Image (cartoon, rainbow, N blue to C red):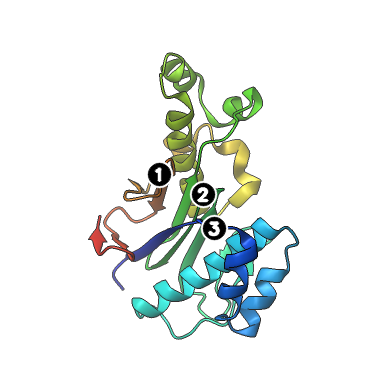
């Protein structure tokens, strides 16, 4: 089986009060239960948009039949119970949601929008050399988020999830796969895709872009 990955990102444009009911009405019961498992309105909206986007990607690119739901491992990583041969990754931030599905390769995706950065977070994500490199940056927040999403995508691809957060600093040295910086994203959103197969075909489901 050739290694193939399809990904998509969608902007969060409106409030949960108006968008969430519209999306929920289009989702099967199993996906609706997945959405309402979380309590906060924004978290529900993000889950609803992930469900809608994932179902679109899977159907549009004929990766599998209609998926009835998604599960999460103990380390937080998502999986498709009915299609264990497929690797799936999801991400969301204040401005966007992202999904990636792959066959023949593991995949990780991560997106972020501008946020307040604490010294603790910076030290947990960046190596000493990276901190020195960014110290004089005129766009520190964006440059940091580009590095963070690159590392987080690789961490998800490796299958460690949030429990592997402490290994973020050195993931650049240990990850043997390939990264792609995501393009055509909403304003101020940055992100990366990671696959563990160097020659995997990566395709943007929303614009026909091949990487």
Badge 2 or badge 3: first in the primary sequence: 3
Q: Position of residue 180 (x, y in %)?
A: 33, 48
- Image height check: is 190 above or below 51? above
| Corner quadrant of residue 164 | top right
Q: Tell me, for residue 14, which label it has, or none.
A: 3
Badge 1 or badge 2: first in the primary sequence: 2
Please state which of residues 188 and 203 is positioned toward the viewer in this rendering.
188
- Image height check: is 175 above or below 143? below
Report the side of 119 relative to 113 (left or right). right
Mark toward the viewer: 3 or 1:
3
Alpha carbon of mark 3 to alpha carbon of mark 1: how far? 15 Å
Alpha carbon of mark 2 to alpha carbon of mark 3: how far? 10 Å
- The answer to whether mark 2 and mark 3 are in CB contact below 8 A is no
Q: For mark 2, does the 10 Å Cα neighbourhood hold few (<14), some (14 to 19), or many (20 or more) residues?
A: many
Q: Position of residue 124 (x, y in %)?
A: 60, 30
At a point 66% along the width and 70% down the height, the residue shown is 35
At a point 40% along the width and 80% down the height, the residue shown is 59
Q: Tell me, for residue 87, which label it has, or none.
A: none
At a point 50% along the width and 52% down the height, the residue shown is 158
The N terminus lies in which quarter of the figure? bottom left
Q: Which residue is mark 2?
A: 95
Report the side of 123 relative to 130 (left or right). right
Alpha carbon of mark 1 to alpha carbon of mark 2: how far? 9 Å
- The answer to whether mark 1 and mark 2 are in CB contact below 8 A is yes
Q: For mark 1, does the 10 Å Cα neighbourhood hold few (<14), some (14 to 19), or many (20 or more) residues?
A: few
- The answer to whether mark 3 and mark 1 are in CB contact below 8 A is no
Q: Which residue is mark 1?
A: 187
Disc 2, SS: loop
Disc 1, SS: loop
């Amino acid at each position: 089986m050739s290694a193939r990955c399809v990904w998509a990102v969608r902007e969060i444009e409106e409030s949960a009060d108006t968008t969430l009911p519209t999306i929920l009405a289009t989702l099967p019961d199993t996906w609706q239960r997945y959405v309402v498992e979380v309590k906060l309105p924004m978290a529900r909206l993000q889950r609803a948009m992930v469900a809608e986007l994932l179902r679109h990607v899977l159907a549009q690119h004929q990766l599998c039949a209609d998926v009835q739901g998604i599960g999460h491992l103990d380390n937080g990583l998502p999986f498709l119970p009915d299609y264990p041969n497929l690797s799936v990754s999801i991400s969301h931030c204040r401005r966007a949601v992202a999904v990636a599905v792959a066959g023949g390769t593991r995949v990780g995706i991560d997106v972020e929008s501008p946020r307040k950065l604490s010294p603790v977070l910076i030290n947990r994500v960046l190596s000493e050399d990276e901190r020195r490199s960014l110290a004089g940056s005129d766009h520190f927040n964006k440059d940091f988020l580009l590095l963070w999403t690159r590392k987080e995508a690789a961490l998800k691809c490796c299958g460690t999830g949030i429990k592997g957060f402490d290994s973020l600093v050195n993931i650049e040295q240990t990850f043997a796969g390939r990264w792609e910086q995501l393009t055509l994203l909403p304003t101020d959103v940055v992100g990366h895709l990671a696959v563990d197969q160097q020659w995997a075909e990566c395709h943007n489901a929303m614009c026909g872009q091949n990487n």
